[in-house]
């Protein structure tokens, strides 16, 4: 058991816009009513049902006891939903269970990282432990830095037309399984320079696919050393096009990692205009920041999974520049691309079965489900190794019970 002496809890305010009255529990203690922020234990840290803006609105952004609802990256309410605990609707009945769970999560993280302070989120806390002296925010020239900024894509949006009356669900790999999967991919190492060699040109009779010149070139080049490619992409296969929204939010995204360019050249016409090459790849066994938990318990532990997800978020997110703005390291850019390619295959399988996929990232696929699809989506997710949310499994169970409680069109019990 951890010897960390800091205790963690949860506070649920009755009105998140005007937080005062609410329920609080510290490290599994009995839920109690509070009338003001000052009623909370002075030596505890509480995850609240408040976002950062709501915390700033009450001038509590520097309050050492309060953390936002997304402290674990997943929102507090969604975690409680996964645990099947009604903390928003009836906090008095279950808040002690949630606070005990969160306290245990932090202690697990402390045992792994040995941090001395808890930052605004678990991701930030882990990042500060992995990179105590910070990281470089430039990787060659300003133009090379701009290329990495453009190549970074936090979440893959899809071109979808959702139906009315649908419910949103997140189908995900076990967080620890996802962290271990990413561990299998190599990390790019610089310095970075402009490739001066000959660029690929496709034959007119083979403009895309694994037999095209572009795919063969990118696949071979990318297996030897990391690179970013400036590309023009057109004529994506119709069955794949909806799943590949091609911006990083508001800007065009023409620079992409070479393995993503190779993937796209298998399903689209890709013209390679320029290449920025790195020096070599580095395996996770040779770095200090890889996810180290390999136990079978880790694959099924929800608490350890939250820590694993924050770890992956820490090493695949942007880094603040001292002069302002955010930089995106080659490591972060490549990890996000590996994540997208892995999830595309899963998203494609769901999409081909008429399941609306809205986005995917960080080991999870976000879908919109109609009521008649509840059971089907659950079954398809499990076939693909994904875990449906608990509410979806519960809804299926209720529907099955209702189905078995009917006989010749009449209810058995009236």
Image: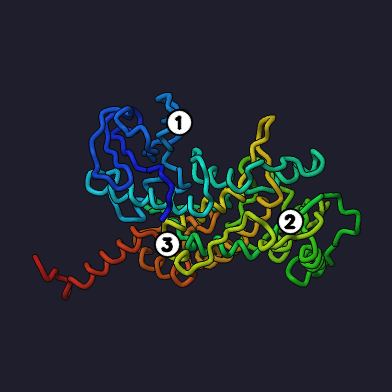
Q: Which residue is mark 1?
A: 53
Q: Earlier in the sequence, mark 2 or mark 3?
A: 2
Which quarter shows the C terminus? bottom left
Q: Secondary structure at mark 3?
A: loop
Q: How many marks?
A: 3
**Residue 264 visible, this angle:** no
**Disc 1 to disc 2: CB gap under 8 Å:** no
Q: Return the residue found at the far left.
A: 414
Quarter of the rendering containing residue 321: top right
Q: Nearer the viewer, mark 1 or mark 3?
A: 3
Q: How far apart, in angstroms, are the residues tagged by discs 1 and 3?
A: 32 Å
Where residue 333 is drawn, which disc sits there? none
Which of the marked residues, 1 or 2, is nearer the chain's N terminus?
1
- The residue beneath circle 2 is 188
User: With 6 as the anchor, is 277 left or right in this view?
Assistant: right
Q: Estimate the x, y position of residue 19 in percent, counting from the top left.
A: 33, 29
């Amino acid at each position: 058991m951890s010897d960390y002496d800091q205790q963690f809890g949860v506070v649920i305010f009755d009105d998140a816009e005007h937080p005062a009255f609410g329920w609080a529990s510290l490290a599994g203690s009995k839920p109690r009513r509070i009338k003001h922020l000052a009623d909370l234990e002075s030596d505890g840290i509480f995850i609240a049902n408040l976002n950062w803006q709501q915390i700033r609105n009450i001038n509590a952004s520097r309050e050492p006891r309060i953390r936002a609802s997304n402290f674990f990256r997943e929102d507090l309410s969604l975690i409680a939903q996964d645990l099947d605990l009604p903390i928003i609707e009836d906090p008095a009945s279950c808040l002690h269970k949630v606070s005990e769970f969160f306290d245990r999560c932090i202690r697990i993280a402390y045992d792994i990282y040995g941090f001395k302070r808890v930052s605004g989120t678990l991701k930030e806390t882990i990042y500060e432990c992995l990179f105590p002296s910070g990281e470089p925010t430039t990787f060659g020239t300003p133009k090379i830095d701009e290329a990495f900024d453009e190549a970074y894509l936090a979440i893959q949006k899809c071109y979808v037309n959702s139906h009315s009356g649908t419910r949103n669900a997140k189908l995900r790999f076990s967080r620890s399984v996802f962290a271990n999967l990413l561990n299998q991919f190599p990390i790019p190492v610089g310095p970075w320079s402009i490739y001066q060699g000959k660029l690929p040109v496709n034959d007119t009779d083979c403009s895309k696919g694994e037999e095209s010149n572009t795919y063969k070139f990118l696949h071979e080049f990318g297996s030897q050393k990391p690179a970013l490619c400036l590309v023009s992409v057109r004529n994506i296969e119709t069955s794949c096009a909806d799943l590949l929204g091609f911006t990083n939010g508001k800007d065009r995204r023409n620079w992409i990692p070479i393995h993503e360019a190779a993937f796209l050249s298998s399903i689209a016409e890709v013209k390679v205009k320029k290449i920025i090459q790195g020096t070599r790849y580095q395996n996770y066994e040779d770095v200090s920041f890889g996810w180290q938990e390999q136990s079978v318990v880790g694959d099924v532990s929800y608490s350890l999974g939250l820590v694993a997800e924050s770890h992956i978020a820490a090493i695949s997110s942007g880094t603040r520049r001292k002069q302002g703005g955010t930089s995106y390291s080659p490591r972060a850019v490549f990890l996000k691309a590996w994540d997208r390619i892995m999830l595309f295959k899963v998203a494609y399988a769901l999409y081909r079965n008429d399941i609306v996929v809205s986005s995917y990232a960080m080991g999870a696929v976000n879908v919109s489900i109609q009521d008649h699809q509840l059971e089907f989506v659950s079954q398809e997710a499990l076939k693909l190794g994904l875990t449906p949310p608990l509410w979806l499994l519960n809804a299926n169970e209720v529907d099955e019970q209702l189905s078995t409680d009917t006989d010749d069109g009449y209810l058995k019990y009236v």
